[in-house]
Amino acid sequence: MIASFKFLGAGIACTALSGAAIGIGIIFNGLLGAMAHNPRLVERLFQYALLGFALTEAIALFVLVIVFIILF
């Protein structure tokens, strides 16, 4: 019974990964919109987008670590 609750908890924790995926999509959606409005700043905008992507992906990695801690 405890093992089934571990799997349930890990599955619920994995729902945070969908939030990270949505966040990454929003970041690159904003990048494409900003590039269309101001093409001269493409390099700087891309750097900001990569920083946002890295921070959002770090959240997803933290979630995976927590899921593995729950499971094992």
Image: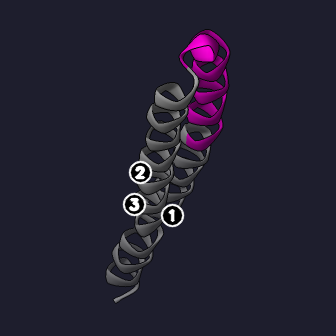
Q: Is residue 52 left or right of residue 2?
A: right
At x 48% / y 49%, what residue is drawn?
Answer: 26
Quadrant in the picture for residue 66: bottom right
Badge 3 is on which residue? Answer: 18
Residue 48 among magenta residues: yes
Magenta extent = 39-56
**Residue type at the position of mark 2:** Ala
At x 42% / y 75%, what residue is drawn?
Answer: 12
Badge 2 is on which residue? Answer: 21
**Residue type at the position of mark 1:** Ile
| Camera-side mark, 1 or 3 | 3
Residue 35 among magenta residues: no
**Res. 32 mark:** none
Q: Can you say whether 67 is above or below 29 in the image?
A: below
Please state the horizontal and vertical placement of residue 46, each as a whole percent of the image. Answer: 57, 19
| Camera-side mark, 1 or 2 | 2
Q: Secondary structure at mark 3?
A: helix
